[in-house]
Amino acid sequence: MTLEIVLDDDVALAAALRTRLRREVARMVRAAALHDAKRDYDVALRLCNDAAIRELNRAWRGKDRPTDVLAFAQREAASADTALLGDLVISLDTAQRQAKRGLYKELLHLASHGLCHLLGYDHRDDAEEATMNARAAALRREAGRSGRVHAA
């Protein structure tokens, strides 16, 4: 399992927070792979500002505004490697504004939401949203555990 975390040059995140985020998102990715009976998944996580995510949102979704998280699933590509899940992009600016229970919890929530999109979940209706939210919550629970990673 590979998790790459990239911070844009103009984004600052305390080292302890970055270390915890890397550890717990990596646990979520591993738990997802185990759930799906896969050996490993590869995910990249980019933390950026509102201007950068607005540009991506405009280019890829036609929405000219910042958003909190974008997911770019690689499995949708014609010659996709099944281990390569894709890329998550989170706006630290938006995460900070939305954080009602602290920045770290918001970042973990956004990462689990984006990871679910990479796994093929969506929220076009209430039933899909409930299913996706349940999977995201299971991934976050596994992220917070210690010891051997279990499927989630």
Image (tube, rainbow, N blue to C red):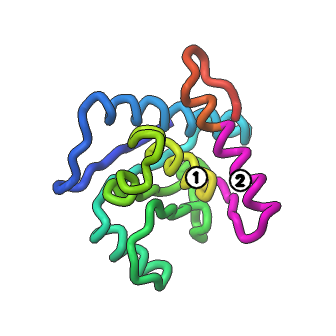
79 on left or right of 65? right
Q: CA distance from mark 1 to mark 2?
A: 8 Å
Residue range (magenta): 119-138
Mark 1 surroundings: few (<14), some (14-19) or many (≥20) residues within 10 A: many
The residue lying furthest to the top in this view is 147
Query: In terms of image quadrants, where is residue 73?
Result: bottom right
Q: Which residue is mark 2?
A: 132
Which secondary structure class fits the magenta region best?
helix
Amino acid at circle 2: Met
In the rendered structure, does residue 132 fall within the stretch colored magenta?
yes
Q: Nearer the viewer, residue 2 or 26?
A: 26
Q: Quarter of the image containing the C terminus? A: top right
Q: Nearer the viewer, residue 96 or 34?
A: 96
State the SS at label 2.
helix
Give the mark nearer the N terminus: 1 vs 2. Answer: 1
**36 sits to left or right of 51:** right
Q: Which mark is residue 113?
A: 1
Residue 71 place in picture, x, y as percent: 51, 61
In the rendered image, the vertical position of residue 148 relative to residue 123, given as above or below: above
